[in-house]
Amino acid sequence: MNTEHNFFAPGRVNLIGDHTDYNGGLVLPVALSMGTYLTLSERDDNLCSFSSDNEQADFEIGETEMSKPHDCWVDYPLGVIKEFADRGYHFHGYNFHFRGNLPIGAALSSSASIEMVTAFALNALADNHFSTLELVKMAQHAENDFVGMNCGIMDQFASGFGKDGHAIALDCNTLNYEYVPLALDGLRFVICNSKKKRGLVDSAYNQRRQECEEALHILQQLVPIQHLCQLNMEQFQELSSQVSDQFSDTVLRRARHTISENERVKEAVQSLRKHDMTHFGQLMNASHASLRDDYEVSCPELDFLVEYAQQFEGVLGSRMTGAGFGGCTVTLIAENKIERFIEELGKAYEKKFGMEMEGYDS
Ligand code: GLA
């Protein structure tokens, strides 16, 4: 039997800072212990086969079909293979078998973890020619260009650079980052999966990006900025009032979310460093309100989970996480309350929406 090689890349939960990454802002994700495993083995022929424990369809693909999308999960590894091919590395004759324990399409970066595990595996075949940062950029580019989802860099970065027991404070403009220890002292971040399918997430996501670009263009008439997150709230309020006739209400709110969220991440990083988790929780609550009201990427299921959590004894803060429109929430809660929280919230959620919520410890 041909030798097998095993690789792993984690998913992530973003603690705060959503829809800031493509606006040159800050994010604060944590890599999860859940993720995607890849077993790579050589074949005796020139085909590549792709299979997954999570998906029905297996693929056996020759070189010509590898460079075009198939409109399904196999595009994640194929997009990364194309990135390597564009740099002169060609891999034929391998079996790629994926396994994972991340819920799929639940805003915990299952797709980024497939891309990153493929990138790690191919890099091993390429004698580790590429740095982790290069692999992260190749994976993001694969998702933008090959898969067609115009995402920012947060998910691939968190999957590539995740470190146990730490959040990553990443500046998505400079790509400077710091690991911030999660010294939680009797508290935990708990993830609740609404199981709400995220229907039109790609088109709504791309539309939000366009609205932010529109806001940027208006503001660029007044200041030479490259990204919305170069402004603080005070500057934004001052500048936007000078060109208020050019802003639609929607575009103004999109920009306000982006810039206020960026400020919240800055404060959240300081709170985490100072162990001021009460304030961290308040920032999470404010972040959810802004994503719901200004950015309009929440949904009734996520709002219910968050509002219930915010009332629950022992909870310091709760918010939706990731792109939105479904997926998961993240809640900061006293460790000894978790069991009762998951049980009671699960019951209330099922009663209201007829769906079973799932809870995970981050
Ligand atoms: C998705 C994208 C990220 C980021 C988040 C929202 O997860 O892949 O780049 O924009 O949404 O914060």
Image (cartoon, helix red, strand yellow):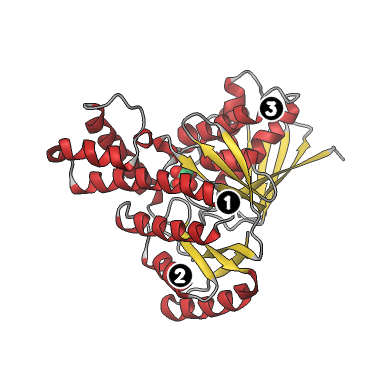
Q: Look at 52% across and 41% down and name the residue there.
A: 154
Residue sticking out furthest to the top: 88
- The residue to which callout 1 is attached is 274
Look at label 1 and name its amino acid: Lys
Between 253 and 113, which is closer to the camera in this rendering? Answer: 253
Q: Of the numbered discs in the image, which one, if any, rests on residue 310?
A: 2
Element under label 2? helix
Q: Quadrant of the C terminus?
A: bottom right
Between 142 and 174, which is closer to the camera in this rendering? Answer: 174
Is residue 1 rendered to the left or right of residue 149? right
Indicate the quadrant where residue 231 lies: top left
Label 1 packing within 10 angstroms: few (<14), some (14-19), many (20+): few
Q: Of the numbered discs in the image, which one, if any, rests on residue 53?
A: none
Look at label 3 and name its amino acid: Phe
Look at label 2 and name its amino acid: Gln
- CB atoms of marks 1 and 3 within 8 Å: no
Q: CA distance from mark 3 to mark 2?
A: 50 Å
Between 52 and 177, which is closer to the camera in this rendering? Answer: 177
Q: CA distance from mark 1 to mark 3?
A: 48 Å
Q: Look at 57% across and 28% down and name the residue there.
A: 82
Where is residue 109? Give x, y as percent. Answer: 55, 49
Of tags 1 and 2, the one toward the viewer is 1
130 vs 316: above or below: above
Where is residue 175? Give x, y as percent. Answer: 53, 31
- CB atoms of marks 3 and 2 within 8 Å: no
Mark 3 vs mark 2: which is more N-terminal? 3
Element under label 3? loop
Label 3 packing within 10 angstroms: few (<14), some (14-19), many (20+): some
Of tags 3 and 2, the one toward the viewer is 2
Element under label 1? helix
